[in-house]
Amino acid sequence: MGQVTVRFLGCGDAFGSGGRFQTCFLVRSDTARFLIDCGASSLIAMNRFGVDPAEIDLILLSHLHGDHYGGLPFFLLDAQILRRRTRPLVIAGPPGLRKRLTDAMEVLFPDSSRTRSSFPLELIELRPERPQALDGITVTPYVVEHPSGDPPFALRIECGGKIIAYSGDTGWTDALVEAARDADLFIVEAYLFDKKTKLHMDLDTLTAHLGDLTARRMILTHLGADMLARASGLPYQCAEDGATVVVG
């Protein structure tokens, strides 16, 4: 069985703290090439790190905030206008995806959502706790705690014999225990150090729940300014823009 890798094209928060790009992870295996989230800066990050957007067959979305899906209009227009893409693309995310993507396209580039595409585009709205087979992987979404207009998800992804779990943005919820169960890699947000909020995870709370999590490896992402100031002294691995990790 081949190698599965995750490349952090963007691991920053919504505000670019520390000069980081917004959330976008590239997963590669022998049979799959897909993105987890596609924040507004993602196409810039792909160009910065030499990733060809044409290699992407699938984009999975955790939730519909701009720093996690706002790069889609740029990605789609780049595929249509510059790259003359012909290979199919699948975008899968929370219920509401179709409307929210259309709205974003029309706000940023009027009439763009009505332009005939040069490539087949399939939009799939995932159902909570229902495994969905997509282009050589299986993804199972779990509803978490992060109001974003439509249900926010943590994602559990089976790919190349490995399991990648991703918290999305969320305060602590027991849904993360199942999403990350025995995962080879759990990518979890730690936006804050010890300040409590219902919208995001703080490291203090995450640490208190480590005994509930059975993932084999954990990497922190979406670090805010107070976390970045402490990152070098933390006993946890933190994501870095451009870094690649082998899963398992």
Image (tube, rainbow, N blue to C red):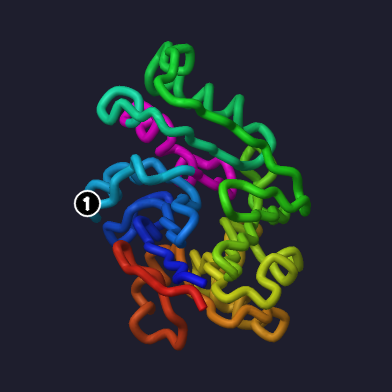
- x, y percent for residue 35: 46, 50
Q: Residue furthest front?
A: 1
Residue appearing at x 57%, y 57% in the figure:
168
* 229 in the magenta segment: no
* 71 in the magenta segment: yes
Q: Quadrant of residue 233?
A: bottom left
**Up-down relation of residue 116 to residue 189 (above or below):** above
Residue appearing at x 43%, y 11% in the figure:
111
Closest to the observer, 67 or 37:
37
**Up-down relation of residue 83 to residue 237 (above or below):** above
**Up-down relation of residue 185 to residue 6 (above or below):** below
Q: Quadrant of residue 163?
A: bottom right
Q: Amino acid at mark 1?
A: Arg
Closest to the observer, 246 or 30:
30
Label 1 neighbourhood size at 10 Å, few (<14), some (14-19), many (20+)?
few
**Up-down relation of residue 173 to residue 23 (above or below):** below
Specify whether 35 is left or right of 200.
left
Residue that badge 1 annotates: 48
Residue 184 at least partly seen: yes
- x, y percent for residue 29: 46, 62
Q: Magenta segment, which residues? A: 58-78
Closest to the observer, 145 or 77:
77
Residue 209 at least partly seen: no
